[in-house]
Amino acid sequence: MVKKCLENFVPQINPERNYTKEVKYKDLMGYSFEQILSEFNNRILGWFINPVDELTDEGSNVGHYGFPTTMACCVLIDLLCQYREGLERSTESIYRNYLGLIHVSFNHKLSKTINSVEYKNNLPYEVIITDLAHAFYHGFRCGIIHNAKIMEYGRINGDPKIAPDVIQERKWDNEGTQIEVAVNPGLLFKVLKYNFQTYLQELGNKKNTNLRENFAKRFKQDTGIVPEWK
């Protein structure tokens, strides 16, 4: 059976739905690319950034809210890498590559591999973790989305003695043979906020044609509206 090509698929969306708190989908129809970027910014702020800021003293001190902060970051990273690539969904390779753009520490190799387990079609298979981007994708992003937890080798902590960087490998036993991957949620959130604002600035530059075109593709998949990006 030949599958119908969905490359130019435009979803049918109730125009009375809210894109942001103040703007409905129908309002976006006459917006310029710059106005759409402004509303995209409002949407990300309203859905992800402002709620975490309110919980965590503007992301500086996450306290007991490390898990929801990390959860919001994981989902926002998924969304932003999709918009950068003009894709409806992210893949492992796209997600991991994007992590390296967010912060250089994600590119660090582990001193030794970590063996973990994933499930596909309800069957377990071994996953061999080789670097920090891989560890974050599998242990944090997939752990939270698929299992509502961080995988066994992962840890979130805002203590600079434990997690002085966005993400790092650390030894946790007396012999120094056992390793875990620690994420500082507050630092991760700060880095992601900065990366998001940088992305918006790049989109505002008409010379970044590929970036603007990819945004328009993903926006079309999201809303059914094709922005005039050129």
Image (spheres, rainbow, N blue to C red):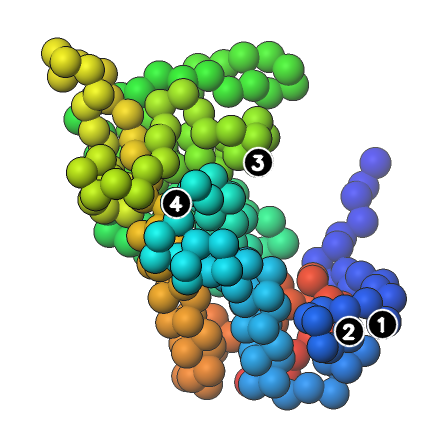
Where residue 100 appears, x then y in whole percent?
31, 50
Q: Is residue 22 visible?
A: yes
Residue 92 higher or lower than 81, as above or below: above
Q: CA distance from mark 2 to mark 4?
A: 37 Å
Residue that mark 3 sits on: 145
Point 55% across, 58% down: residue:
51
**Disc nearer the start of the sequence (2/1):** 1
* 10 Å crowding of disc 3: few (<14), some (14-19), many (20+): some
Give residue 63's mark.
4
Q: Is residue 188 visible?
A: no
Residue 83 higher or lower than 216, as above or below: above
The image quarter containing residue 119 is: top right
Given residues 138 and 59, the one toward you in this image is: 59
The image quarter containing residue 57 is: bottom left
Left-right relation of 183 to 222: left
Point 59% across, 66% down: residue:
46
Is the C-beta separation of discs 2 and 1 under 8 Å? yes
* Secondary structure of the residue carrying numbered label 1: loop
Give residue 25's mark.
2
Q: For the residue marked with disc 3, what is the amino acid?
A: Ile
Q: For the residue marked with disc 4, what is the amino acid?
A: Gly
Point 51% across, 44% down: residue:
68
Q: For the residue marked with disc 1, what is the amino acid?
A: Pro
